[in-house]
Amino acid sequence: MQPMKRTPLYETHHTLGATFTENYEDWRLVAHFTDTTEEHRTVRQGVGIVDLSHRGRLRLTGSDRAAYLHRIISNDVEGLSVGEGNYATILTNRGKIIADMNVYVFEDSIGIETNAETTLSLYQELDKYLIADDVTIEDFTERTGAVGVHGPAAAELLQTVYGFDVGDLPEYHSFVGEIDGRRIVCVRANETGEVGYNLYTPTESIESLWDTLLTKGRAFGAAPVGLTSLNSLRIEAGIPRYGAELGDSVFPGEAELERAISFEKGCYIGQEIVARMKYRGHPNRLLRGFEIASDIPPQVGDRLFAEDKEIGWITSAVVSPTLGKTIGLGFIRVAFTDEGSRVEVQTADSRVGATVQLLPFYQREA
């Protein structure tokens, strides 16, 4: 049995008294530092600092990199300029999701960020279609670290501490800077329903970055947060996650991932199925939110019913610190997707009422 992977900040987190996950896709990561509700509120009210170094980071170089990626993934690549980016998926030939990713275009390369659990499968999918293309694909995960800075004070913190003027940076766009002679990449990211930025730097610089953000960020209400809070924040923001809402049994249209699809570009793997579902039919089920009449969140996989007919299932659920109620995400048959529709959740003990909600539950107004 292989030992669990650890991020470059593991010992730093241990010193801060972090509680770690037992196993997160073969990684030992921070579940929380203190009370999870307080960490959640830190992001909603100030700024949370989170270690994202476990996420997969791939780098494409070579003169054909944009053209190659453009014909493989679901979103536009060739139309992106340096500093721009987008959200995309890579699909099976039947149009189902192998991995989702963020794509960032730099002057000398294209960067891809994906989930820890899809890093290998994404690398393999990208690599297997290479024939005579001038493209090199490298896994940069262990050579770099990543720190998220999320919350209403995030832009002000980065401006004050590093002089990064990123307040008007659009989502998925990047800023390349330098700290102490080392390159740092800052990208705009919405992972919590708040203003957010993810910073990437070589592994040897990540501890200094983390320490500086926490120390100088105290004036902005900054504190470290773990994955438990990051998960409750994303559920409130209605953001699907691979391994929960997304997977190789899900079509992008079912998860309403139109932002990950270009309907203007030419062929890519799975394109025919995606286009057919949009223009000639519709999914049988859709991702929705649920307000659940229980103080205890249902379990992943708990079934949804209407008039004793099974109509869907729960994929994520939490007691929302922001809303003060139990909420969840899940898939439900199209006939029951209207906002306000009443359904029931079959838990281990009983059936509880739930109301269908359009997503997101929460998004800070600009």
Image (tube, helix red, strand yellow):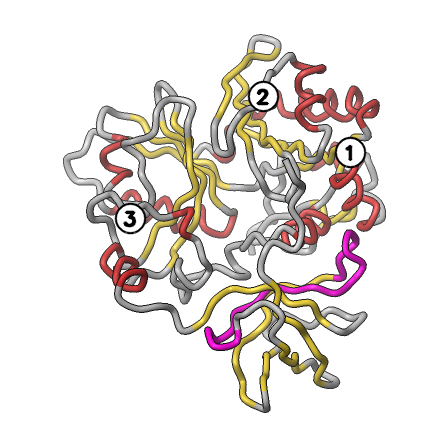
Left or right relative to 55: residue 14? right
Question: Which segment did they paint magenta?
Answer: 319-336
Sequence-earlier tag: 2 or 3: 2
Quarter of the N terminus within the rendering:
bottom right
Badge number at residue 166: 2
Sequence-earlier tag: 1 or 2: 1
Q: Position of residue 174 (x, y in %)?
A: 49, 25
Left or right relative to 230: residue 331? left
Q: Quadrant of residue 7?
A: top right
Kindly indicate whether the residue at mark 1 contacts the one at mark 3 (C-beta within 8 angstroms).
no
As drawn, 98 above or below 346: above
Badge number at residue 46: 1
Q: Pointer 3: residues within 10 angstroms few (<14), some, or many (20+)?
A: some
Q: Which residue is labeled 3 in the image?
A: 263
The label nearer to you, 3 versus 1, is: 3
Q: Residue furthest bottom?
A: 308
Residue drawn at (50%, 52%), measured in percent from left and top? 117
